[in-house]
Image (cartoon, grey):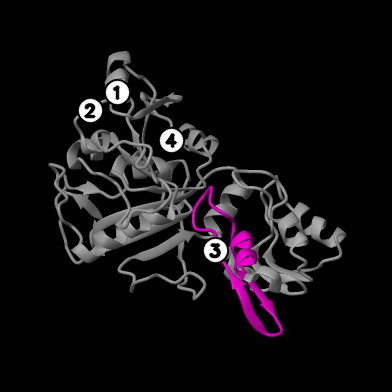
Amino acid sequence: CVVARDGRVVGEGHHARAGGPHAEVLALRDAGARARGATLYVTLEPCAHQGRTPPCAPLVREAGVARVVAALRDPNPAVDGRGLGLLRRAGVAVETGLLAAEAARLNERFLHAMRRGRPFVLLKVALTLDGRIATASGRSRWITSPDERRQARWLRRLHDAVLVGIGTALLDDPVLLPTPLTRRPVLRVVLDSTLRLPPASRLARTASARTPVLVVSCRADASRRRALEARGVEVLEVAGEKGRVSVPAAVEALARRGATSLMVEGGGEVLGSFLAARLVDQVALFRAPLLLGGRGSRPAFGGEDKADVGDALRLEPVPAEPAFPWPFAPRFELWRPRR
């Protein structure tokens, strides 16, 4: 959010984390008395409801702002034009649509969650040129370079939750934290039908309010559950499907918890389950200049075989737009389902 008066910027701010002050609040605080009679530019409609923070539209009105230019109307059912309506009734000139495409890209994950009622899902895959993620014995360290692994850890910062299957958790004993750590917690999720995650695993040992861990199960053993919860791990039981956690049920549970975006890191069976359920909004491919070969080496996407090539999910590249700048030269390809 930017406050401008007489052709000069007099205040600016951005929403740094969920539960923190919204951009308008910080921009108006920065502008102070200079906001009276000024124009306020913002990427998303000022809210008019009490959520984790007080509503912004009344603050804009009370600051004496003369004109508001909002790139996008907020599709959140709790807002959805109410903030703009409040401002218009107060005599504030309101415009929308300026740089709407760029603002939509910046707010892509939030907008998707509000419109679709489920988190935005990114599938992240590190694979060889022949589409393999591990040897037949499951060894995958290291397919990609240190730079690519750093970028993958950075990608976690963009999402509310990061998810792996129990196979990956047992084989790799990952921590799944973003680098660097964000001010807001990133929920680490394990799909674990029968609660096989060891209480001594790095995930369980690092579970805290700052770095939470959620294990999603469909057949939770009571003693194993108590052992994990004693470590601070949250255990959630959802519907199962063929003896495994139902991926749609797990995603629905994350939506109820308020997650707007989810990064899925594997392994192949979990990635294949998301693909089969068509719960895919973007795919980040880190391709290593390797040919692994072998009939038993593990494919990036597991699951049941398709009957026909026509059953494949068709993708298109996501263009690198200035509205979504990376802090580095990307070493991955970004794709989305063809529209």
Above or below: residue 237 compared with residue 75: above
State whether residue 145 appears in this view: no
Percent across and percent down for residue 339 are 56, 60
Q: Do the residues labelled 1 and 2 touch (CB within 8 Å)?
A: yes
Q: Which of marks 4 and 2 is nearer the N terminus?
A: 2
Residue at image x 75%, y 55%? 58
The residue wearing badge 4 is 247
Q: Which of marks 1 and 2 is nearer the N terminus?
A: 2
Q: How crowded is mark 2: few (under 14 residues within 10 Å), some or many (20 or more)?
A: some
Element under label 4? helix
Return the mark for residue 199. 2
The residue wearing badge 3 is 14
Q: Which of marks 3 and 4 is nearer the N terminus?
A: 3
Residue at image x 50%, y 43%? 259
| Camera-side residue of 297 and 142 | 142
The verdict on residue 322 being magenta is no
Q: What stretch is highlighted in magenta?
A: 1-30
The verdict on residue 22 being magenta is yes
Between tags 2 and 3, which lies in front? 3
User: Which residue type carries mark 1?
Assistant: Ala
| Camera-side residue of 316 and 163 | 163
Q: How crowded is mark 4: few (under 14 residues within 10 Å), some or many (20 or more)?
A: many
Element under label 1? helix
| Residue 78 shown left or right of residue 167 in the figure | right
